[in-house]
Image (cartoon, rainbow, N blue to C red):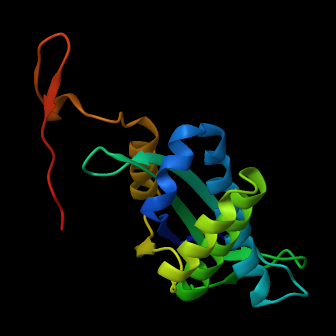
Amino acid sequence: RQMCIRDSHCIFTIDEELRHFFLEDRSLLNCLFSSVHSVIIRMFHKENQSELFTPGFICVLHTFGRDLKWNPHIHCLISEGGIGKSLRWRHKKHFNYKLLRDSFQTALLNELEKQIVPSFKKVKAAIYKKDKNGFYVYAEPALTDPSTVSKYISRYLERPVIGLSRIDSYDGESVTFHYNRHE
């Protein structure tokens, strides 16, 4: 029997004040992956601690936003379910986005504090004060068709920072380009 596994697409974003840390030290980008990983695993394990359900998920780093400015964030496809110790699939349709936001903020700030000690403590405190609801985690509706999912994620894996179609002119030194604002 074949089972159709649905996936949710989540985007884990960070506070704008953190971006320069990742620009100055690219090795810190690993903190984004480890933080997202720990948050997703924790969310599924909380569902049933004796089973320790584990989902399938793929994370892709994006280092720029629509305006092409430095803006590291993680795109993640997460299965709407997981397998636990009993090896039976358990569906999970509801993701607690408040938990994801708060947990991601805490996990990332703790990870960064380990890497950037001791000067990061003041930044961490200011961000907790400013971002009381955690970091923004965007969730799109479930993606069910496997070919749609694979096309979507592969677009992020192969896409350059700026597409040729966005370049208006290049004089050997300067590039002029355009982008669409999506506010």
Seen in the picture, residue 33 relative to 98 is either above or below; the reply is above
Across and down, in percent, residue 115 comes to 74, 51
Across and down, in percent, residue 13 comes to 47, 64
Seen in the picture, residue 165 relative to 4 is either above or below; the reply is above
Residue 56 shows in the view: no
Across and down, in percent, residue 38 comes to 74, 67
Quadrant of the rendered image containing residue 55: bottom right
Across and down, in percent, residue 80 comes to 59, 76
How many marks the image carries: the answer is 0
Q: Residue shown at 66%/71% (left/top)? A: 1
In the rendered image, the quadrant that contains the C terminus is bottom left
Which residue is at the front of the view, 89 or 152? 152
Q: Residue shown at 62%/85% (left/top)? A: 92
Residue 133 shows in the view: yes
Q: Is residue 21 left or right of residue 41?
A: left
Q: Is residue 76 left or right of residue 27?
A: left
Q: Residue shown at 48%/73% (left/top)? A: 137
Pick out the residue farthest to the top: 172
Which residue is at the front of the view, 116 or 73? 116
Which residue is at the front of the view, 177 or 82? 177
Q: Residue shown at 73%/66% (left/top)? A: 110
Seen in the picture, residue 26 relative to 33 is either above or below; the reply is above
Quadrant of the rendered image containing residue 112: bottom right
Pick out the residue farthest to the left: 168
